[in-house]
Image (cartoon, rainbow, N blue to C red):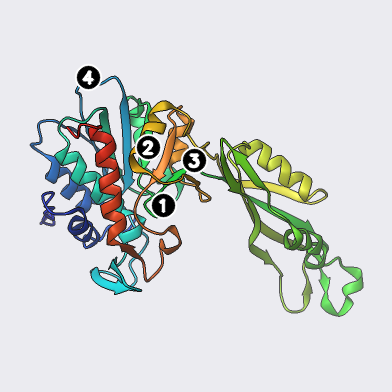
Amino acid sequence: MPAEVPVLDLSVSSVELTQQLCDIASVSGDEARIADAIEASLEGLEHLTIVRDGDTVVASTSLGRAQRVIIAGHIDTVPINGNVPTRFEERDGEAVLWGRGTVDMKGGVAVQLKLAAELTDPIVDITWMWYDNEEVASDLNGLGRLARNRPDLFVGDFAILGEPSNAGVEGGCNGTLRVHVSAHGKRSHAARSWVGVNAIHAISPVLATLASYTPREVEVDGLVYREGVNAVGITGGVAGNVIPDLVTVEVNYRFAPSRTGAEALAHLEELFSGFEVVQTDVAEGARPGLDAPIAQDFLAAVGGTPAPKYGWTDVARFSALGVPAVNYGPGDPLLAHADDERVPLAHIEDCERGLRAWLTGPDGR
């Protein structure tokens, strides 16, 4: 028997809707039930056209507006660790909703769903996207799959991703590059080490370079992005009595969006000159996307001072398609994936208020 589809009540507050969404387990790869619930909650709304692609749900208006905005959020979470069901708490004098997904990023999805249902006459056409498999390998990402299957849905003038940003606007994102830096040696018995070449010893200049590295702070379109080059893993060694002939350090470079992935790789190759450097993964960054008039109108409506997004997010997918994009969602990104993940209720309410004000215009229609 197929599992019963959970019922979402889009008439409740965005805070209550966040709790409903969080209490539907949707660890990456297991999003069918929450996607079914989202699709069912929107069925019958005459102002929306619904498209389903795997476990990604898209709802679009077609009002003939001069501009179209894409507003997206992922519906999966990292694994649950005793932090579902959610509960309301008081932390440091602040009301919060505690539990998996409250920050990353069902609070943002709740705001989007409520507005998608209620805003029948926005000042722009809107394409709402709720997608699966964001928290895993890039080739599984529902937004990437949707872009391959339905590129027509990505036509827009501006995009907003509901990633946690402390209910403020974070423009663009850093790129990320991973490489393996290797040193080679020669095996020998440890009792006769002088006839071998110890690869672990040989890699020490790489570790010294990383330990003394000063990351750049780069201004891009008015926002200052902080870079980072760090060892995130190391492998080597054969046995307790063998001089190792190979050691590899995995290095992650978070680079400012003014640099391309190719330029980032060239920087690491120069930094680790004399060592074998092999790229294993790269994701381009995204410029802030705040210079367009529509972005300026959005900033004016939601208020606050924009900041850079240091981590990589799916705004880069929109940027690569020529759609400027920003991050705007409730929750502290430092609490994403934490076992004590929790979102201030005020963040959820502020994001709903800001998006509603922008999408309805000064007359609040």
Give the side of residue 12 with respect to residue 135, left or right.
Answer: left
Q: According to the image, label 2 marks what residue? A: 300
At x 45%, y 62%, the residue is 334
Identify the residue at horizontal 19%, vertical 55% (top origin).
17
Distance between the alpha carbons at the discs numbered 4 and 3: 28 Å
Looking at the image, tell me whether mark 2 or mark 4 is earlier in sequence order.
4
Q: Position of residue 60 (x, y in %)?
A: 22, 31
Graded by Cα atoms within 10 Å as few (under 14), some (14 to 19) or many (20 or more), the crowding at tag 4 reads: few
Say which residue appears at 32% left-offset and 72% top-offset. Answer: 93
> Is residue 53 in view?
no
Residue 165: mark:
1
Mark 2 or mark 3, earlier in chain: 3
The first of marks 1 and 4 along the sequence is 4
Disc ID at residue 64: 4
- N-terminal of the pair, mark 3 or mark 1, is 1
Residue that label 3 marks: 172
Image location (x, y in percent) of residue 34: 21, 52
Amino acid under disc 4: Gly
The answer to whether the residues at label 1 and label 4 have Cβ atoms under 8 Å apart is no
Q: Determine if residue 226 is in view.
A: yes
2 or 1: tag closer to the N-terminus: 1
